[in-house]
Image (tube, rainbow, N blue to C red):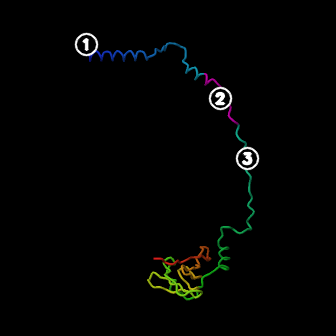
Amino acid sequence: MLRTGQARQVLAALATLLLVAGCTRTVNHSSTEPSDLEKWVKDTRAKPAPPLPPLPPIQPFESFTYDAQALRDPFDVTATAEQITANGPRPDSNRRRQPLEMFPLDSLKMVGTLGHGPGMAGLVMAPDKVAYRVHVGAYIGQNEGRVTSIREDRIDVMELAPDGAGGWLQRPATITLNSQ
């Protein structure tokens, strides 16, 4: 007689065998009749292909004639540089240099003012730890900066900076009161 564990193993093996036998389908390979898939493939290949859409018409190339030979070349900087240097602002190379012109403008700090009204003077601390007195019209910074106005909280400066084409551009700058 079979024990309970052996009986279960035999029953499980028989059940597996029956499931596998039930899932298999007998295929008759000797039959000459094609399957549904083979019929569909054969029918699809027998159909003619749809016609291709016509190509778009080719646009004719329109030629362009360049008629600006007599005009100024926009990439020639010599002509514009000569006009700018003749008419634009320029630094005065003959004037005597002032002490604050040896320091960059961003290294200078406003520390206060002296007086009030139109004769007001600004106090500027330079990197050499010396306080300098400046008035309107004084030169300051390394870019030909000239003091245009002095107020209690700032000093306005107009610098001359090279524009790269041989001319000079005016650019405003401000030194604000150093609040420590």
Report which residue position mark 2 lands on: 49
**Which mark, residue 2?**
1
Q: Main secondary structure of the magenta part?
A: loop
Disc with the residue nearer the chain's start (1 vs 3): 1
Left or right: where does residue 14 sit relative to residue 129?
A: left
Q: CA distance from mark 1 to mark 3?
A: 92 Å
Name the kind of residue labelled 1 in the image: Leu
Name the kind of residue labelled 3 in the image: Gln
x, y percent for residue 83:
68, 76
Residue furthest top as drawn: 1
Is 152 rendered above or below residue 30? below
Q: CA distance from mark 3 to mark 2?
A: 29 Å
Left or right: where does residue 17 sit relative to residue 44?
A: left
Q: Are marks 1 and 2 in contact (CB under 8 Å)?
A: no
Residues rendered magenta in the picture? 43-53
Name the kind of residue labelled 2 in the image: Ala
Say what secondary structure mark 3 lies in: loop
Say what secondary structure mark 1 lies in: loop
Q: Toward which corner of the image does residue 33 lie, by quadrant?
A: top right
Residue located at (69% from left, 36% from top): 53
User: How many other residues sit within 10 Å of disc 2, few (<14), some (14-19) or many (≥20)?
Assistant: few
Report which residue position mark 3 lands on: 59
Q: Nearer the viewer, residue 64 or 137?
A: 137
Is residue 50 rendered magenta in the image? yes
User: How many other residues sit within 10 Å of disc 3, few (<14), some (14-19) or many (≥20)?
Assistant: few
User: How many other residues sit within 10 Å of disc 1, few (<14), some (14-19) or many (≥20)?
Assistant: few
Q: Toward which corner of the image does residue 45 lie, by quadrant?
A: top right
Disc with the residue nearer the chain's start (3 vs 2): 2
x, y percent for residue 157:
57, 79
Is residue 15 rendered magenta in the image? no
x, y percent for residue 136:
58, 85
